Amino acid sequence: MKKIQKTNAMRFLDQHKVEYKAHTYEHKENDPVDGVHVANMLNQPVEKVYKTLVTVSNTKEYLVYMIPVEKELDLKKCAKVAGVKSCEMIHVKDINKITGYIRGGCSPLGMKKQFRTFMYEDSLNQDTIYFSAGKIGMQIEMDPKDLVDLIQVQAVDIIKE
């Protein structure tokens, strides 16, 4: 079995002695980078696989949101829970500059800087959730409560109904 090359997100978890499992899936150049495809590749229900989205507020603060891959972020709810007037998605071209990651491989852990992070409240009903390990083709599986404790994630209602 081939040894998995650790990502910044995995090293961050190791450094803080947090339990997780690393999962890989094959990603070909022309494969979609959407989360539903990832959930299918991992043989997991879409409500257990999360995507990491980065926004910028009207005060120029970067905010990170984690939601199930089949859901849509509600930017008004996002602004409300963050205590800002408004927020919008960052441009795809800015993802690497801001986070150190690329589209489809953005993890809430191991970013260039740790930003305030919010997660869909129903995640706490799951034993484990999956999210990007910081590289396309790699996912981290861990207890969402450990994520809350580790980086002070706030579990809130942030999806469109």
Image (cartoon, rainbow, N blue to C red):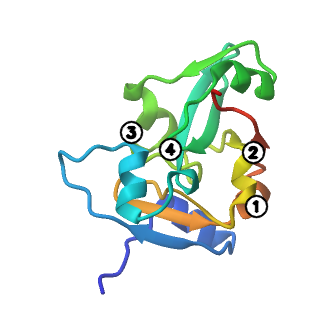
Amino acid at pointer 1: Lys
Q: Nearer the viewer, mark 1 or mark 4?
A: 4
Say which residue appears at 18% left-offset and 49% top-offset: 29
Give the residue number, with chain letter if any, for mark 3.
Answer: 103
Q: Compute the Cα span from label 4 to label 3.
A: 14 Å
Say which residue appears at 40% left-offset and 28% top-offset: 92
Q: Badge 4 local density, few (<14 within 10 Å), some, or many (20+)?
A: many
What is the number of the mark on residue 69?
4
Query: Which of the 4 image quadrants contains residue 27?
Result: bottom left
Say which residue appears at 43% left-offset and 56% top-offset: 39
Amino acid at pointer 4: Val
Residue 16 location, x and y as percent? 69, 69
Give the residue number, with chain letter if any, for mark 2.
Answer: 121
Q: Nearer the viewer, mark 1 or mark 2?
A: 2
Q: Compute the Cα span from label 3 to label 2.
A: 24 Å
Going from N to C along the chain, the mark reached first, 3 or 2, is 3
Give the residue number, with chain letter if any, for mark 1.
Answer: 145
Amino acid at pointer 2: Glu
Query: Which of the 4 image quadrants contains residue 24?
Result: bottom left
Going from N to C along the chain, the mark reached first, 1 or 2, is 2
Q: Compute the Cα span from label 4 to label 2.
A: 14 Å
Q: Compute the Cα span from label 1 to label 2.
A: 11 Å
Q: Please state if 49 lies on the left or on the right of 122 as rendered.
A: left
Residue 71 location, x and y as percent? 55, 37
Q: Nearer the viewer, mark 3 or mark 1?
A: 1
Q: Secondary structure at mark 2?
A: helix
Query: Which of the 4 image quadrants contains residue 103?
Result: top left
Say which residue appears at 50% left-offset and 24% top-offset: 90
Q: Secondary structure at mark 1?
A: helix
Q: Compute the Cα span from label 1 to label 4.
A: 19 Å
In the image, residue 52 above or below residue 61: below
Are the residues tagged 3 and 1 within 8 Å (C-beta)?
A: no
